[in-house]
Amino acid sequence: MKELIKYIAQSLVDNPEQVEVSEVLGEQTSVIELRVAKEDLGKVIGKQGRTAKAMRTILSAASTKMRKRAVLEIIE
């Protein structure tokens, strides 16, 4: 799931080398933290948060298939 978010984020931004994805594992839930360059933050979030919501939906579908729960946090 971490690689999936990294791939999507790198496809969206102008500076793909500055995309950082880390995963904090819990018993049932894992938190995926996404960091991008400050100037690319708007591209990852999208108008009215639509891009971020779409990424969360894809992550939710992938995590459901693996029978885990994952949450995406976009960090400034």
Image: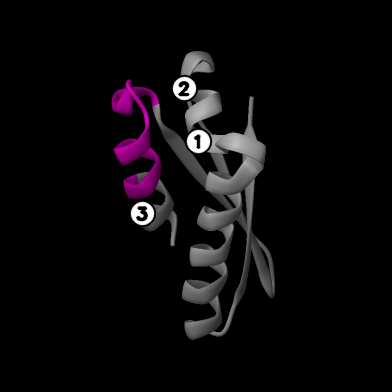
Distance in Å between CA atoms under marks 2 and 1? 7 Å
Question: What's under tag 2, amino acid-wise?
Answer: Asp
Q: Position of residue 24 (x, y in %)?
A: 61, 52
Residue 48, placed above or below residue 31: above
Name the mark on residue 3.
Answer: 3
Q: Check if mark 2's residue and mark 1's residue have beta carbons within 8 Å.
A: yes
- The secondary element bearing badge 1 is classed as helix
**Crowd rating for badge 1 (residues with CA inside 10 Å; few <14, some 14–19, many 20+):** many
Question: What's under tag 3, amino acid-wise?
Answer: Glu
Distance in Å between CA atoms under marks 3 and 2? 19 Å
In front: 75, or 8? 8
- The secondary element bearing badge 3 is classed as helix
In front: 48, or 12? 48
Q: Is residue 32 visible?
A: no
Residue 65 in the figure: left or right of residue 53:
left
**Crowd rating for badge 3 (residues with CA inside 10 Å; few <14, some 14–19, many 20+):** few
Q: Position of residue 63 (x, y in %)?
A: 53, 74
Name the mark on residue 72.
Answer: none
Distance in Å between CA atoms under marks 1 and 3? 16 Å
Of the residues tagged 1 and 3, which is closer to the observer? 1
The residue that disc 2 covers is 40
Q: Measuring 37% from the left and 29% from the top, which residue is drawn there?
A: 13
Q: Quadrant of the C terminus?
A: top right
Residue span colored magenta:
7-18
Residue 66 in the figure: left or right of residue 47:
left
Name the mark on residue 44.
Answer: 1
